[in-house]
Amino acid sequence: MSEGSGSQEARVCLGVVVGVHGVRGLVRVKPFTQDPMAVADYGPVETKDGARRFKIAATGVAKGVVICRFDGISDRDVAEALRGTELYVARAALPDVDEDEEGYYHADLIGLAAEGPEGQVFGRVTAVHNFGAGDLLEIVPPDGSPSFLVSFTDENVPDVDISGGRLTLVPPEGTFGADEAKDDKGEADA
């Protein structure tokens, strides 16, 4: 694979290696796919930087992770060195989704304009994170101020329009500091 080829097209992270299984090089993968075993359904996976590529086979599910075999990995120590490796495939390798049925991939959200219900512009989605408690959208404001995170919930993001290039954002109270807490007199609430 040529250097930087992963950056030329959209990619989707299917899972991350969280440990090893046994002594023959099997790895435990936390899947980000709806069907856990589908982590191996879309062809070879590559590392985030695109430097390594693996043919992958899912062999089973155990305690919320998928046990996988990577071609060329047959040693526990080599497999252990993969801990923390995110596994990507090209967006084009995944099946199309029906946006009318609220179908999209997290990668499809990157670059969408984040707008309020009355048209106010909050910025653009630059990343989707998940640190274990649910998905978070990272939004970068247009004025260059620091990015902020918003929980990706139906309450905070009631509408996603992939084809229109936007999503509706209703940030939780307090997202932008004390300015939101001002009453009609312009004084901060106590």
Image (cartoon, rainbow, N blue to C red):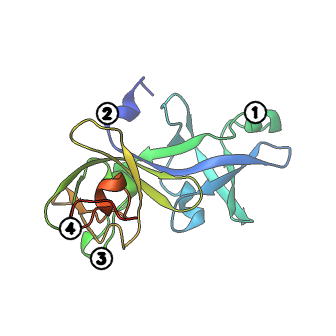
Q: Residues within 10 Å of mark 4 (few under 14, many from 20)?
A: few
| Gap in angstroms between the C-alphas marked 3 and 2 | 29 Å
Instruction: Give the Cα separation between the discs numbered 4 and 3.
Output: 40 Å
Q: Closer to the camera: disc 3 or disc 1?
A: 3
Amino acid type assigned to the residue bearing label 4 in the image: Asp
Q: Nearer the viewer, residue 60 or 139?
A: 139
* In front: label 4 or label 2: 4
Query: Tag on residue 184?
Result: 4
* Above or below for 176 versus 55: below
The residue where tag 1 is placed is 78
Mark 3 or mark 2: name the one nearer the start of the chain: 2
Q: Residues within 10 Å of mark 3 (few under 14, many from 20)?
A: few
Tell me what residue is drawn at x 36 percent, y 61 percent. 95
| Distance from the alpha carbon under mark 4 to that under mark 2 | 50 Å
What residue is pinned by disc 2? Answer: 8
Badge number at residue 101: 3
Task: Give the CA distance from mark 3 to mark 1.
Answer: 42 Å
Image quadrant in which you'd find residue 76: top right
Q: Which image quarter holds the N terminus?
A: top left
Query: Where residue 58 sits in the image (x, y, percent)?
Result: 65, 57
Depth check: 68 or 141 in front? 141
- Identified at 15% across, 60% down, the residue is 164
Q: Which mark lies nearer to you, 3 or 2? A: 3
For marks 1 and 2, the one nearer the N-term is: 2
